[in-house]
Image (cartoon, rainbow, N blue to C red):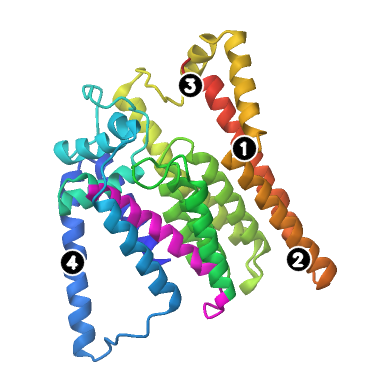
Amino acid sequence: MAWILQATAIILLLYIASLMNLLSFFGLILPRIGVILGVYFIIDNWRRRHFVFTKISLVTSSFLGYFILLAGTLYHSRLLHYDNFSHWALIVKYLLTQQALPDMHSHIIGFSSYPIGTSLWCYYFVNFVGFNEGVMLVAQFCLIMSCLYAMVAVIKDKSNLLTVSVMFLVIVLFNYFNIAIRMNNLLVDFVLPLLTLAAIAGIVNYQKNIYMMSATTIIVTSVLGIVKNNGTFFVVIVLCYYVFTVIKNKTGQLSFAKKSVFVLGTVGLTMTPYILWLWHIKNTFGQQLSKHEVNVTAYQNIYEAKTPAVINRVMQSFLSHVFSPATVPTQGIIMINLLFIITIIIISMRLHQKNHLIIGLIMTNLIIVGYYLGILMMFIFSMPN
């Protein structure tokens, strides 16, 4: 969990600094502090003779090879997706050149209401290494790899080759089904679910330590909320799982009052960065509406511009795409359900063991349906004709 925790902690620090107009100072000082501490750690451990090159595990070496292979490719790649030049790469360049958040006079930025979570992470890299398309891609890939590596935390026995193989199979499937977004751009649609899984992995890993579990949830999930507006959907999933884990936690016999304090504190602190962003948007841009403003008036104006015929066309296109077995996402959903059902049958009927996979199957499908409904509502209420 260390990699994703340090990445999200840096994003949070830069986020607070940007709201306080101190981005330039923190952007310069943070990486230098990191280098100094790194050098001190190596020298101190070397002097104490504790600095030993331990045997690299199969998991670590596999992730390292995967990282080197793709990072080298991404560094020599160029940004192609249009959205990079309408916002995602553009906002990184703006943060670098202006060392401040956009304001109402910054006409070059079109999406004024978009949070800047991953953009700050890319800014952190280019501010230290140098501005380059490949550097930005590698920066975001580091965040993606940190999320994937965090998922390994749920494996109790990392020497179990079968369990580790299943984990890598999951990563392979992520790459296969990530056909629309890929990793050779700065779009965040792939980062959102990965941050969600990293946060859930933290909850599973620290479920017997409510202090670490709460701290991990706050750090990772608060960043998840400021990656993109629809990140709130994923934040709710993580917080629901956190609350469920706290309620069933019997370690140390925590009282109801103490559990309530942890839940309210974690939920409140997790939502604070996003609330601060909404406050920043309101105070900076006032009543000016942007393309993706989370605003009832904006939704009403866009919705009223659509005729019943347009809405009907959107519904038909959406449903035909969702229920078509030829589309990759639908194939993935069918495969997930089949894997769940087959596994439940084998464990229950052949091995005669109790399991909670039925609950997992139901929850997975509820999340998928909820997300799809959210996408449909976005097309109807939020997207222009």
| Sequence-earlier tag: 4 or 1 | 4
Question: Could you say whether the residue bearing mark 3 is in a helix, strand or loop?
Answer: loop
| Residue 353 shown left or right of residue 240 in the figure | right
Q: Which residue is mark 3?
A: 383
Local crowd size for mark 2, using a 10 Å CA cut-off: few (<14), some (14–19), many (≥20): few
Q: Quadrant of residue 170?
A: bottom right
Residue 261 at least partly seen = yes
Query: Residue shown at 64%/46% (left/top)?
Result: 333
- As helix, strand or loop, the secondary structure at mark 1 comes to loop
Q: Earlier in the sequence, mark 2 or mark 4?
A: 4
Residue at the image position 51 percent from the left and 9 percent from the top: 305
User: Is 364 displayed left or right of 208 in the figure?
Assistant: right
* Span highlighted in magenta in the image: 134-161
Residue depth check, mark 1 versus mark 3: number of the one nearer the observer:
1
Secondary-structure class at tag 2:
loop
Are the two marked residues, 2 and 1, in contact with CB atoms closer than 8 angstroms? no
Q: Gap in Å between the C-alphas at discs 2 and 3?
A: 42 Å
Give x and y (percent) for residue 49: 24, 91
Q: Nearer the viewer, residue 134 or 267?
A: 134
* Type of amino acid at the residue the image marks with label 2: Asn
Closest to the camera, between mark 2 and mark 4, is 2
Using the image, tell me which numbered label, if any, was put on residue 35.
Answer: 4
Give the CA distance from mark 3 to mark 4. Answer: 44 Å
Task: Provide the residue designation for mark 1.
Answer: 326
Q: In the displayed structure, does residue 324 sit left or right of residue 120?
A: right
Instruction: Looking at the picture, tell me which residue is in the foreground, 269 or 50.
Output: 50
| Lower sequence index among marks 1 and 3 | 1
- Cα separation between marks 4 and 1: 50 Å
Residue 326, magenta (yes or no) = no
Q: Is residue 236 above or below residue 32?
A: above
Image depth: mark 4 or mark 1 in front: 1
Give the Cα separation between the discs numbered 2 and 1.
33 Å
